[in-house]
Amino acid sequence: MKEKMAKVFRRNWRLYVLMLPALLWLAVFAYMPMYGILIAFKEYKGKLGILGSPWADPILKHFLAFFRTSVAAQVIANTVILSLLTILISFPVPILFALLLNQVRHNGRRKLVQTVSYAPYFVSNVVVVSIVSVICAPSGFVNTIIKFLNGGTALYLTSSAEYFRTLYIVSNIWQTMGFSAIVYIAALTGISQDYYEAAIMDGASKLKRILYIDIPLIAPTIIVMFILSIGNIMSIGYEKVYLMQSGTNTAVSEIISTYVYKVGLQNAQFSFATAVGLFNAAVNFGILLAVNAISKKTADISIF
């Protein structure tokens, strides 16, 4: 066994050298910080360090403290609802976009549309929220249309709790649609042209080619991406939500990540915030295992 591994290494050592920077980055920025998880089980004091800080009594003190707070149920519910709505509404959009883009045969137009579509992904969340605020302001573009249709009554969209989730999801679709579609475009590119030629000879329309060739052949990719999305159901980045928050919409906009940011950094309750974050990660991991197991049993497709 050792001789076989040594032979494989000698044959592919150049590839392992290329992998080294990525492995170092993963070790330094993904695995070494996990050492800080200990803070969740300690009464962390900055001057004492992680190891020098005393253990919490009881050991799950900070986890229990979170569930005893008046906002715990609301924060968890807001996180799950916003994440589920985002997945249910946003997840199919990149797939549909990739299927439609795959029907464009002119390479120049196709590349232009693809470039324009994924460019918003690289726009800062600060800029995205600023654009949303300007467009949805009482004198903005959206309210201009609303006032024209309903006779002059403007809506306070950005500060209203009932419109927060809609604005978040719509802006998220605009921001991530093109970039998320890259995976599906790559999967569609890998489909053999023989399938399309045979379908055309049989008289299949474009719609039937999409339904009976494209979608079935990229289904494994769709399932894997869906599993990964469900596995992150409790993980919503705090930046965009925090920037969209106002005093009048926190009832629906306060999620776990923004709560951890406020408690951990603004109030310096590092142990408590770490415990909440660890709880969030543990739930995500459990959901990922469950969804992966269901997918493997029903569709024989899984990520591990």
Image (cartoon, grey):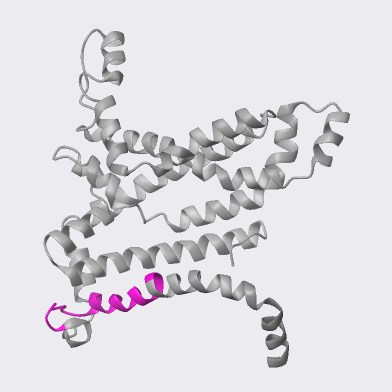
Residue bounds of the magenta highlight: 29-48
| Quarter of the image with the N terminus in it | bottom right
The x and y percentages for residue 290 are: 51, 63
Give the side of residue 139 with respect to residue 101, left or right: left
Q: Residue at x 21, y 66 (%)?
A: 273
The x and y percentages for residue 270 are: 18, 69
By secondary structure, the bulk of the magenta-drawn segment is best described as helix
Q: Nearer the viewer, residue 187 or 235?
A: 187
Q: Residue at x 19, y 76 (%)?
A: 61
Quarter holding residue 168: top left
Q: Nearer the viewer, residue 289 or 91?
A: 91
Q: Residue at x 68, y 43 (%)?
A: 188
Magenta includes 32? yes
Give the side of residue 249 with respect to residue 284, left or right: left
The x and y percentages for residue 89 are: 46, 38
Relative to 230, does residue 214 appear above or below in the rendering?
Answer: above
